[in-house]
């Protein structure tokens, strides 16, 4: 990473609470009912427009392939709470898509497991 990308990264790491306030436009954390957790996978559905906030554009740019909320937070050096708020905005605008993590998708049905367990106990 060099040139403008390096300067952009350096400016994001500097600041503090004021910087986070500006990034989130002073908004609080998203609703606790939000379906996003640290392992939710995010993938972009297109490209950022010319007037898109830099942090939102960075999320759209790095999510060409599915990344977890925790990975996005690490790559952008922003707290998970801020990333969750930004992702909520991007989901609402249709710029990104949220997918269940592989672990959640691959879990077997509890009723099926119980039926198998009862069947084995009856043998």
Image (spheres, rainbow, N blue to C red):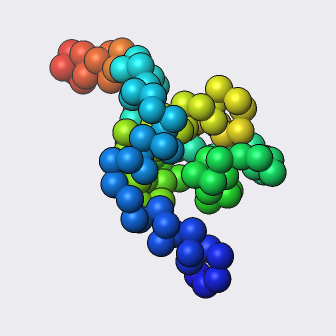
> Given the current orientation, which residue lies at the most extreme bottom position?
2
Residue 74, horizontal then vertical, whole percent: 40, 59
Along the horizontal axis of the image, is 21 left or right of 58?
left
Q: Which of 113 and 23 is in front in this view?
A: 23
Q: Which corner quadrant holds the C terminus? A: top left
- Residue at (61%, 84%) from the top-left corner? 2
The answer to whether one can see residue 61 in this image is yes
- Residue at (58%, 81%) from the top-left corner? 1
Place residue 119 in its image quadrant: top left
Residue 80, horizontal then vertical, whole percent: 37, 45
Q: Which of 109 and 9 is in front in this view?
A: 9
- Residue at (67%, 57%) from the top-left corner? 61
Along the horizontal axis of the image, is 122 left or right of 32?
left
Residue 99, horizontal then vertical, whole percent: 56, 36
Along the horizontal axis of the image, is 93 left or right of 117?
right
Residue 4, horizontal then vertical, whole percent: 65, 76
Q: Is residue 19 above or below residue 88?
A: below
- Residue at (63%, 36%) from the top-left corner? 90
Place residue 89 in its image quadrant: top right
> Given the current orientation, which residue lies at the most extreme left position?
121
Q: How many marks?
A: 0
Along the horizontal axis of the image, is 77 left or right of 114?
right
Q: In this view, does 16 lie above or below 112?
A: below
Q: Is residue 51 above or below residue 4?
A: above
The answer to whether one can see residue 40 in this image is no
């Amino acid at each position: 990473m060099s040139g403008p990308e390096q300067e952009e990264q350096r400016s994001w790491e500097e600041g503090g609470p004021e910087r986070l306030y500006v990034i989130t436009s002073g908004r609080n954390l998203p609703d606790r009912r939000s379906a996003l957790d640290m392992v939710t996978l995010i993938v972009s559905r297109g490209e950022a427009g010319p007037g898109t906030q830099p942090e939102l554009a960075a999320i759209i740019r790095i999510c060409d392939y599915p990344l977890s909320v925790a990975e996005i937070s690490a790559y952008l050096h922003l707290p998970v709470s801020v990333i969750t708020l930004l992702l909520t905005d991007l989901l609402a605008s249709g710029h990104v898509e949220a997918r269940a993590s592989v672990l959640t998708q691959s879990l077997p049905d509890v009723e099926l497991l119980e039926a198998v367990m009862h069947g084995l106990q009856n043998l």
